[in-house]
Amino acid sequence: MPKDRSSSSDYTGPLRRLLLAVLILILAGTFLLWRIDSPRVERFRAQITDRIVPNLDWAMAPVTGTINLLRDFQSYQRLAEQNRELRSELRQMQAWKEAALQLEQENARLLDLNNVRLDPRLTFITGVVLADSGSPFRQSVLLNVGARDGLVDGWATMDGIGLVGRISGVAKNTSRVILLTDASSRIPATIQPSGQRAIVAGDNSAAPPIDFIENPDLVRPGDRVISSGDGGVFPAGLLIGQVAADPGGRLRVRLAADYERLEFLRVLRHYGTETVSDSARVISNGLPPIAPAVSQ
Amino acid sequence: MNDLSATRLWFMRAGFLFLALLILFFHLLPLETVPRSWAGPDLILAFAFAWSLRRPEYVPPLALALIFLLFDLLLQRPPGLLALLALVGCENLKSRGRSLRDASFAAEWFTVAMITTLVLVGNRVILALALVPLPRLSLALSELAATILVYPMVVGVTHWVMGVRRTAPGDLDALGHRV
């Protein structure tokens, strides 16, 4: 019945078109609002994530575990080969361990001699990785600690060894960590032993390039890259990785943290380094500054 | 009959929502923390296109908009833009559904490939116009190619596993009318 059909589409057509137009306007408005006032929409995004993802955890944990188990099973096939590699590596490591122990003792003695007090406020919270960014375009992970645990935007996160990223986006129960490999990540760094300042700028590849080196001639592959603490956002002295040169001659960082398996991350509590801003008053204000130090 | 088809209609709508959540769930599993040089297919886009061509009444615009917006929010994309383009693409395909009903699968694949290209390229162009930092071109191209290549498989799953088929002439639609 063609007549019947056309009359029914006459009835539903305008309504349907109106609904579609409203939906399109709302979506376009969302995008414009995000472009204009990004922090507010990002907060909204963090809250939505906070509502949804922790509820999926009961299902995600077993599925992730199973898939990782299967992957491990594949790697068992290369077991003999790996074993040989590991044994030779172990021999080298024993020599290093000896050196490290001696250095540790020496370091402790020197620290004791100098009466050095390391920053006692640098404590950490450990969180579990709930989810990743879900798309290959962004590099981030979601942690199960959030504003409830006192987290603040900008804090550094590490795995056991090296820097992993920084907190960006805190909701009540969850927080997002932008990894060093993300295209929007920029971390001020120092390259040891030359002491050159540089920026480690993520570009969505496994080894982020090093930008803005003052004098690239002084930097050699194998040098250590540590965070410099410039800008007061990050604590200084966290290990990022080693310098490596890619085939194009560009300097990159081979990250120390194990990005293959990010399961537990440490979030370092950092309340900013206090700077001496008004030196004149420090000197002229009442007591001479030397006196208390001497009396100790 | 009318009652039965209404139940089936809502059942299939809920089914699409469940499918979307399942895809989202597998996206969010913390398995990929190392940057990749290629991107997989945008499965939800392919499924939405396949369903829109076959049974437009199972994927109403409101559900599509909500699902795409949720994907944008949870997958760290600029919220709203890809959702908007995907919704327009689906509605465009719905309007072509009647003419494509009698055509071969190759014609359908070609149309879907065209729409997918328009959606993903349009997304990139608008992002560039809005001065948002763009992801690498190789990633975007591999996503486009993978989405187009995976479409026949998505159609197969839709047709045989989920039982979402084109209405044949003489079938009744959800409201009991002859289509």
Image: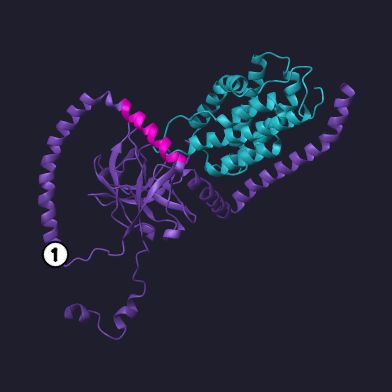
| Quarter of the figure that contains the C terminus of chain B | top right
Q: Position of residue A273 (x, y in %)?
A: 34, 64
Q: Quadrant of residue B161?
A: top right
In the rendering, what colour is chain A?
purple
Residue A26 lies left or right of residue B70; in this view the side is right
Please tell me whether mark 1 sits on a helix, a strand or a loop.
helix
Residue B16 lies left or right of residue A250; in this view the side is right
Magenta span: A59-74
Q: Position of residue B97 (x, y in %)?
A: 73, 23
Q: Is residue A276 visible?
A: yes
| B124 or A221, nearer to the observer | B124
The residue lying furthest to the top in this view is B104
In the rendered image, the vertical position of residue A218 relative to residue B34, given as above or below: below
Residue A64 colored in magenta in the image: yes
Determine which residue is flagged by label 1: A112
What amino acid type is highlighted by mark number 1?
Asp
In the rendered image, the vertical position of residue B139 relative to residue A58, given as above or below: above
| Quarter of the figure that contains the N terminus of chain B | top right
In the rendered image, the vertical position of residue A178 relative to residue A10, given as above or below: below
Residue at image coords 67%, 35%: B87
Residue A45 colored in magenta in the image: no
Main SS category, magenta section: helix
Rendered cyan, the chain in question is: B
